[in-house]
Amino acid sequence: MQEYSGEVFRKLQRTGEEVSGLLFEDCLFQECRFTELTVRNSRFSGCRFENCHILVPVCQGVQLLSCDFADCSLSGIDWSALLDERKRDMGFLPFGSLTGCTLRHCVFFGLDLKKFCFAGADLSGSIFDGCDLTEADFSGCRLSGATFTQNTLCRADFRGASDYFFSLEGNQVKGARFSLPEAVNLLPALGIVLDEW
């Protein structure tokens, strides 16, 4: 395994390539662009990504642990697959923060995201399934086409979020906060018909 520790990588661009057997610890990636990159048997621990584009990666045997992302475009990432099941069950996350990021068509399955801040993120087309999102902050998020299934959303904050639609019965939502007029989108899931008159 090739190891990198504390190194800085700037403006790397890789498209459709395959890499394997890499270990990155406490490394910084700035303004890098990885498109349809296949990554195998590699690990990223405590790394930071700034202004990077990571689009539709194929990951096999890849582990991320406590990596931070700032102002990145992250599309088509299955975050749940980037942790082994044992670590996921212990509440670890592949990321520490996702500040100012675009997170389109990502998968969040079975993750402990209590109090996690997604504020202002574009989460269009993303999937949240079986996650603990108690007190999570979705304020100002764009949620067009995002799905929420069997999550705990108690006391989550959706104020100022847009384009959301999900089942109030298929998720625990006690104490969750919504704002008008977007909250009206939740009523059809309860079988309520709204008419203008």
Image (cartoon, rainbow, N blue to C red):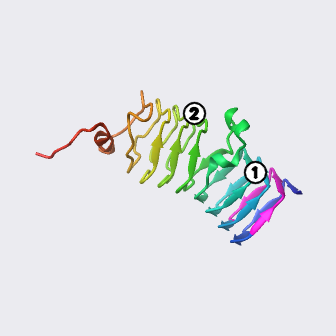
Nearest the eye: 83 or 120: 83
Which residue is located at x 60 percent, y 58 percent?
Answer: 74
Predominant secondary structure in magenta?
A: strand
The spot of residue 62 in percent (x, y) is 74, 52
What span is in magenta? 18-32
Quick one: label 1 or label 2, which is nearer the N terminus?
A: 1
Nearest the eye: 80 or 46: 80
* Front disc: 1 or 2: 2
Residue that lies at the very extreme toward the top in this rendered image: 174
**167 w.r.t. 23: above or below:** above
**20 w.r.t. 62: above or below:** below
* Alpha carbon distance from label 1 to label 2: 22 Å
Q: Quadrant of the N terminus?
A: bottom right
The type of residue carrying mark 2 is Lys
- The disc at residue 114 is 2
- Horizontal side of residue 87 vs 176, given as left or right: right
Magenta span has 23?
yes
Residue 91 in sight from this viewpoint = no
Quadrant in the picture for residue 170: top left
Magenta span has 180?
no
- Horizontal side of residue 12 vs 105, given as left or right: right
The spot of residue 44 in percent (x, y) is 77, 51
Residue ID for mark 1: 47
Q: Quadrant of the C terminus?
A: top left
Which residue is located at x 79 percent, y 55 percent?
Answer: 41
What SS does tag 2 mark? loop
The type of residue carrying mark 1 is Cys
The spot of residue 40 in percent (x, y) is 77, 59
